[in-house]
Amino acid sequence: MVTDSERGKYASPEGSPLIEYLSTFACFMLLLSVGCVGGFDSPALGILTGPDTPISVTGSDITMLAAVVGVGQTIAPTLTIFLGDKFGRKVGLLAIGIPIIIGWVCVANASVVSVLGVGRFLGGLSIGLGLTVTPIYLGEIASVKSRGALGTLVGTALNVGILFAYVAVPYLKMYTSAYVMLGIAAASVVSVLFVPESPYFLAMKGDVEGAEEALEKLRGKTDVAEELEIVKETVKKQSEALKKIGNKREDGTSETGPNKFDNFKDIFRVTANRRAYFINCLLLISLHTGGYTPFLVYGSMIFEAMNISVGKNVMTIVIGVLQLIFNVVATFVIDRQGRRPLIRASGMIVCFCAVAIGVYFYLIEYVNLDLSGYSDFMLVAIFGYMAAFNVGIMPVQLVVMSETFASEIKILATLIMGVTGGVLATFCLTMYMTIAVTMNWGHCMPFFGSAILISITTTLILKYLPETKGKTFNEIQRDLSV
């Protein structure tokens, strides 16, 4: 414990959330860089398939460049358990920037598809690391009253980065924009150097004094004894639960440290962990198979197929702006309306809009109707589609992942979720091109499939997800154990 003379070194008696907000902003900048990686594909693929392409590509090259990001995203979380649990959440945050920086160097100097593919693969690694480490860190440094709002900043930061890429790539061209985004990534890594370590991680490692000092910094208060006790109690209960499971193992061992891969089974043996895993899987399936990821990557191609009067580059930018606006809206409503109401509303809207877009493409591709005069009506469906994802499913998925997994197994659990997300993203991106283009079934079929899957997953999520708004980690774990 810190002594009375040391108490208040980083804090004032009345308290201030300044350090908490600055730490969140550092994560915001890091995730903005990750968002630039995600937003690069749509405009870049439009350039590569155009008449003025700087690199000669084939149809299979386009599929590879889109899918290889998902492959990197799948592999990246395996590094998280070594970085986040062994060296700390802060080291994990710093590690996100390394593949981003190297990846943009490759893209900026690519003269052949293979080098560009390496750059995109490294970008995928950064996405996988960013979407696993950052939500954990934000969930563990945020106060109860601001945890939901700060959690939604993950989605907001990603959307700012996506929007920036949507604007920069078409107008600055591919190579120049890569250098600009390289500079942003480097600046974000520097900002992360100044954030405090997670108090939950420090408590897990037995450094109670360090945990108290971190809480003092984050809360700006000289007395954080009450919250420190909550942190210690949470870590202790989770550790005891895992040790109790370990004592029942057939080999007779009782050691169950959070750094060991044999804790994999504990995720499925503890009721709360098993239910949290199932809920988060459903949310990931909703996000990827619901159509958000294919729309993000193949947006330019989809808009061109719709024959919308607005240019595809302009339309892509408009979508990026709307994603950002609605994600900011989510920041204000997620802690007022709760997680479950947002999932219910967004699931219904996404399902309806996916059916509308699917019918539109079906009439064009199978009935051969000329709907060019009515294409602008699809703007409403597209806007509703992306708005529902960015107000509901995406921010709720990120917040719930940080709230529902116990701290003792959070790194391992989010590693598994990161791999699952990468596999789903790769599968969906590959299948979209295969179904719509290679098999020539048209764009309607993927959207019809999305509507079916989103309706199923939304129903299951509402059945198993307890409301987590305004609850401590202990209360959430109790609800998940029922």
Image (tube, rainbow, N blue to C red):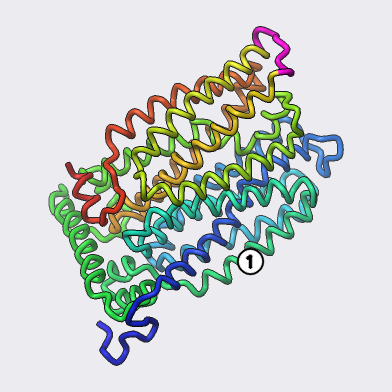
Instruction: Kindly indicate the quadrant of the structure image that contains residue 229.
Output: bottom left
Position above or below: 348 against 257: above
x, y percentage for residue 268?
25, 43
**In the image, what residue type sits under mark 1?**
Ala
Q: Residue at 70% x, 15% y: name it.
A: 371
Q: Residue at 63% x, 18% y: name it.
A: 361
Q: Which residues are magenta?
A: 365-373
Q: Residue at 28% x, 32% y: name it.
A: 463
x, y percentage for residue 12?
36, 82
- Can you identify the residue that label 1 sits on? 186
Q: How many marks are shown on the rendered structure?
A: 1
x, y percentage for residue 157?
55, 54
Magenta part mainly helix, strand or loop?
A: loop
Q: 257 or 226: nearer the eye?
A: 226
x, y percentage for residue 261?
32, 53
Q: Is residue 219 left or right of residue 176?
A: left
Position above or below: 178 against 44: below
Q: Residue at 55% x, 43% y: name it.
A: 71
